[in-house]
Image: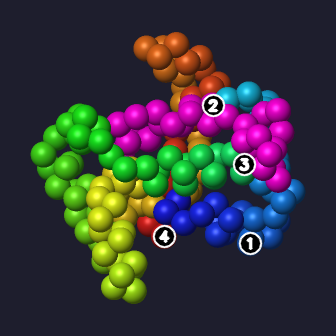
Amino acid sequence: MSLPADSARVQVAHYPSRLTDTLVSEAATNPPLPSLSIICTCLPWTITVTPTRGAIWSAPYVTVGDVLHTLHRTLRLGVTDPEMGVIDAPARDRVHDAYVRRYRRVVDPRERDAEKAKHIKRIDFLRDYRAFYGLSLAQGGLPAKRIPHGAVWVLHTAKP
C-alpha cells in the first residue's frame, strides 16, 4: 500500500497477476455499496472509501480500484500531532522506527532526504505490514459512528 495501486499484484487463483481494467472495475463488495469504511487495529482512524469520479474504474458504487487508490492516497498523508497523541509511547516508538526504515529504503540520497523531510506518514502505523491482504466484514458495523453492519470492513495486511 506504500506504492501506487497500479503496482499491485494479484495473488488469487484464476486471476492475472497484474491488475487489469476489468479487475479494478469490479465491485469491492457484494452487494455493491455506495461507500464503505475501513478499520484496522494498527490505525487510529477510519478510512472512508467512495467512488472515484473520472477514474478508469469509475462506477456508481465502490470498486476494487477505489479501495486500492483510497488506501494508497490516505496512507501517504502526513500524521498530525493529535493523531500521534492518541497512541501510547511504545506504539509511537514503533511508528517512528517504521518511518526511519521507510526513508532509509530509498536508494538515491536526494530522494531519501526528501522522503525523510516528509516526516511520519500514516503508512508508518502499519510498520512492516504494508501489503494489502484483503478486507473482511466487521460484524455489527460501528454503532458509535452510526455506520451500519455491512458498511464497515476490516483491513488485513501482511509483510511485502
For label 2, the residue is 36
**Kind of residue sitting beneath label 4:** Pro
Q: Nearer the viewer, mark 1 or mark 3?
A: 3
In the drawing, what numbered circle is on residue 17? Answer: 1
The quadrant holding residue 21 is bottom right
Q: Nearer the viewer, mark 4 or mark 3?
A: 3
Local SS, label 2: strand
Q: Are marks 2 and 1 in contact (CB under 8 Å)?
A: no
Distance between mark 4 and mark 2 Cα atoms: 25 Å
Q: At 74% from the left edge and 72% from the top edge, which residue is drawn?
A: 17
In the drawing, what numbered circle is on residue 160? Answer: 4
**Kind of residue sitting beneath label 2:** Leu
Local SS, label 4: loop
Question: Of 129 and 20, which appears nearest the observer?
Answer: 20
Distance between mark 2 and mark 3 Cα atoms: 12 Å
Q: Earlier in the sequence, mark 4 or mark 2?
A: 2
Q: Earlier in the sequence, mark 4 or mark 1?
A: 1
The quadrant holding residue 4 is bottom right
Viewer can see residue 103: no
Q: At 73% from the left edge and 37% from the top edge, which residue is drawn?
A: 51
Q: Earlier in the sequence, mark 2 or mark 1?
A: 1
**Kind of residue sitting beneath label 1:** Ser
Q: Is residue 42 magenta?
A: yes
Mark 2 surroundings: few (<14), some (14-19) or many (≥20) residues within 10 A: many
Task: Give how far across and how far down residue 140 sits, in percent.
Answer: 54, 20
For label 3, the residue is 64
Q: Earlier in the sequence, mark 1 or mark 3?
A: 1
Vertical arrangement, residue 15 with respect to residue 74, above or below: below
Distance between mark 4 and mark 3 Cα atoms: 19 Å
Question: Of 87 and 122, which appears nearest the observer?
Answer: 122
